[in-house]
Image: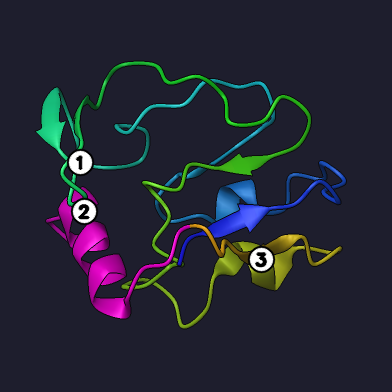
Amino acid sequence: MAIIITDECINCGACEPECPNTAIYEGADDWRYADGTSLKGKVVLPNGKEVDADETQKPISDEVYYIAPDKCTECMGFHEEPQCAAVCPVDCCVPDEDVVETEEELLGKQRFMHPED
């Protein structure tokens, strides 16, 4: 399951530097699959979606920090728990019930984005 940032976010920014996948972005900021990963050029994601990792993607939120779900691994392969949730002062980093993934899927996504780790 990916993590989402709810509308209760106070935009403190504590979560952004903690993400090992660079999946967290400030509201209204564009994002890329290549940011903070080994992905470059045309790739097929583990979910089968074909993307250009270097292409700019539209923000998921304009108001608060947000997490790109295709990049979120709940910190699997890096930490014991999602670091965004661990540092959030208002507990607004919560599991996304709409993006359910197994531990195996999350670890596969982590290895895909960071094959050298």
Quadrant of the rendered image containing residue 41: top left
- Report the residue at 76% width, 36% height from top: 64
The CA span between labels 2 and 1 is 6 Å
Q: Position of residue 104 (x, y in %)?
A: 23, 76
Q: Is residue 106 magenta?
A: yes
In front: 1, or 113? 1
Determine whether the residue tagged by mark 1 lies in a helix, strand or loop.
Answer: loop
Q: Position of residue 89 (x, y in %)?
A: 84, 64
Q: Earlier in the sequence, mark 3 or mark 2?
A: 3
Q: Earlier in the sequence, mark 3 or mark 1?
A: 1
Left or right: 14, with 117 as reference point: right
Up the image or down, 57 lies above or below 25; here it is: above
Q: Which mark is residue 114?
A: 2
Q: Amino acid at mark 3?
A: Val
Point out the image quarter for the N terminus: bottom left
Quadrant of the rendered image containing residue 45: top left
Q: Which residue is mark 1?
A: 38
Q: Which colour style is shown?
A: rainbow
Q: Which residue is mark 3?
A: 94
Q: Are marks 3 and 2 in contact (CB under 8 Å)?
A: no
- Report the residue at 19% width, 65% height from top: 108
The CA span between labels 3 and 2 is 24 Å
Q: Are marks 2 and 1 in contact (CB under 8 Å)?
A: yes
Left or right: 107, with 63 as reference point: left
The region drawn magenta spans 99-117
Q: Earlier in the sequence, mark 2 or mark 1?
A: 1
- Report the residue at 79% width, 67% height from top: 91
Few, some or many C-alpha atoms within 10 Å of disc 3 (few <14, some 14-19, many ≥20)?
some
Up the image or down, 84 lies above or below 41; here it is: below
Determine whether the residue tagged by mark 3 lies in a helix, strand or loop.
Answer: strand
Q: Nearer the viewer, mark 3 or mark 2?
A: 3
Q: Amino acid at mark 1?
A: Ser
